[in-house]
Image: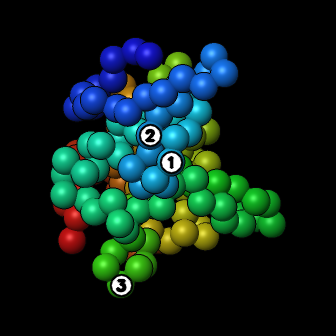
Amino acid sequence: MENLNLPSFAPRLKKNNQQLYIYDEVRKKYVLLTPEEWVRQHFINFLVSQQYPTNLMSVEKSHQTNQLQKRTDIIVHQRNLQPFLLVECKATHIRIDAKVLEQTFTYNLTIQAPYLALTNGLVHHYFAYEHGLYKELKDLPNYE
C-alpha cells in the first residue's frame, strides 16, 4: 500500500487465504485490506491522534438516504451520542471532486453532523455545516 498524507502507524496485519487483512480498532476485528480501507484505518489513527475517542466512533454503518441503503465510512459522535463528524474515505486514486462532495452532503441530510471530512489519504477537505450552508475549514475541527 502507498504512503499517505496522514501520520504513519504500525497496523496489525494478517494474511488469510492469500488475502491481507487489517485490524480495525473501532470494529474490533480484522477486515479485508482494500485501498479504501488503508485510507480509512489511517484516518481513524489520525482522529485518535487528535483526541477523538474510538468508543464514540462508528465505521461502515448503514443508513438510509433517499430510500436507498448506504454505508458511512466513519461517524464520530458527541458524548450525547449525536453525530459530530461524518468522514467519507476514498482510495488514493479517486479524486475528491464535486461528485464525492455531493455524495457526502447527501449522506449528511440523514446523519446531520455539524462537521464533515473528505479524504483520499492524500488530500483532505473539512467542512462545517451552519445555518443550512457548508463552509470549508482549513483544518480538522477539534473534538468538543
Q: Is residue 114 left or right of residue 8?
A: right
In the figure, residue 61 lies in which quadrant?
bottom right
On the image, the x and y values in percent for residue 47 come to: 28, 50
Nearest to the eye among marks 1 and 3: give it.
Answer: 1
Query: Which amino acid type is marked by label 3?
Result: Asn
Q: Nearer the viewer, residue 59 or 96?
A: 59
Circle 3 sits on which residue? 80
61 vs 8: above or below = below
Q: Residue at x 54, y 23 (%)?
A: 15
- The residue lying furthest to the right in this view is 67
In the figure, residue 115 lies in which quadrant?
bottom left
Circle 1 sits on which residue? 29
Nearest to the eye among marks 2 and 3: give it.
Answer: 2
- Secondary-structure class at tag 3: loop
- Secondary-structure class at tag 1: strand
Quarter of the picture holding the N terminus: top left
Separation of residues labelled 1 and 3 (CA atoms)? 26 Å
Query: Which amino acid type is marked by label 1?
Result: Lys
Question: In the rendered structure, are the residues bearing label 2 and label 1 in contact, judged by CB atoms less than 8 Å apart?
Answer: yes
Separation of residues labelled 2 and 1 (CA atoms)? 6 Å
Q: Is residue 108 left or right of residue 2?
A: right
- Secondary-structure class at tag 2: strand
Q: Earlier in the sequence, mark 2 or mark 3?
A: 2
Quarter of the picture holding the C terminus: bottom left
Q: Residue at x 37, y 68 (%)?
A: 56
On the image, the x and y values in percent for residue 86 come to: 45, 58
For mark 1, does the 10 Å Cα neighbourhood hold few (<14), some (14 to 19), or many (20 or more) residues? few
Say whether residue 43 is visible: yes
Query: Which amino acid type is marked by label 2?
Result: Tyr
On the image, the x and y values in percent for residue 38 come to: 45, 30
Say whether residue 96 is visible: no
Circle 2 sits on which residue? 23
